[in-house]
Amino acid sequence: MIENMYKEVFENGYDNLYKILTNESKESITPTECYSVISFVVSIFYRNNYWINLHNKFMDQVYESIYFLSKANGNDMFYMEEQEISIVGKTLGELQSECKSGTKQRIALLTAKRIFELTRWRLINDVITIVEAGSDCEFITSDNPVTVSPKIAGEWPIPFDPTNTLSISIDH
């Protein structure tokens, strides 16, 4: 269902967006086109395994800390988001795997919700800029085609910060 939503809402309009963004005679875009461009770039940025892997790495560290703290205090369970989690007879690795298995759909739904929220926030202040690179530049593809730059250079970008600059290559 989530894949179909992404296809219908974001991916089906790519050909039209490409034409809009590569039309050298076009000097402005409509609010609807602006929404389409921003929502497409935001969706491509957050809809990849990088964020799931980053979340899983962070949660592995959280579970590791809670696991060893519970063991040290003689507890055989702990609470996470109002859910009681037992550690009886489980290794740390088993606990981490068990907790990851139930989060994939939740992360996908939360990400979709955040994409729509961030798109609305970005519509307020974003500026869409097309930068044409020289002819000697080559098109580079990646699992993460959108790059992010924080508002303050040198800082680590906060994932859902609407002040980040998002960039995507659209042609060679």
Image (cartoon, rainbow, N blue to C red):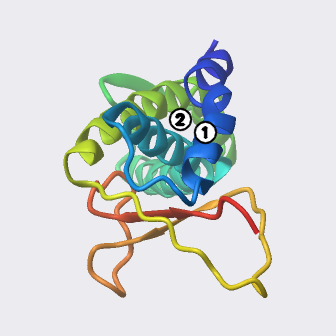
Q: Say if 104 sits above or below 134 in the image.
A: above
First in sequence: mark 1 or mark 2?
A: 2
Q: Which mark is residue 87?
A: 2
Residue at image coords 43%, 57%: 65
Count of numbered marks: 2
Q: Is residue 61 above or below residue 104?
A: below
Q: Which residue carries the number 1 mark?
A: 95
- On the image, the x and y values in percent for residue 88 come to 56, 32
**Residue 100 locus on image (x, y percent):** 61, 36
Front residue of 108/144: it is 144
Mark 2: amino acid: Ile
Q: Position of residue 26 (x, y in %)?
A: 48, 52
Type of amino acid under label 1: Leu
Q: Is residue 165 left or right of residue 41?
A: left
Question: Is label 1 in contact with label 2 (beta carbons under 8 Å)?
Answer: yes
Foreground label between 1 and 2:
1
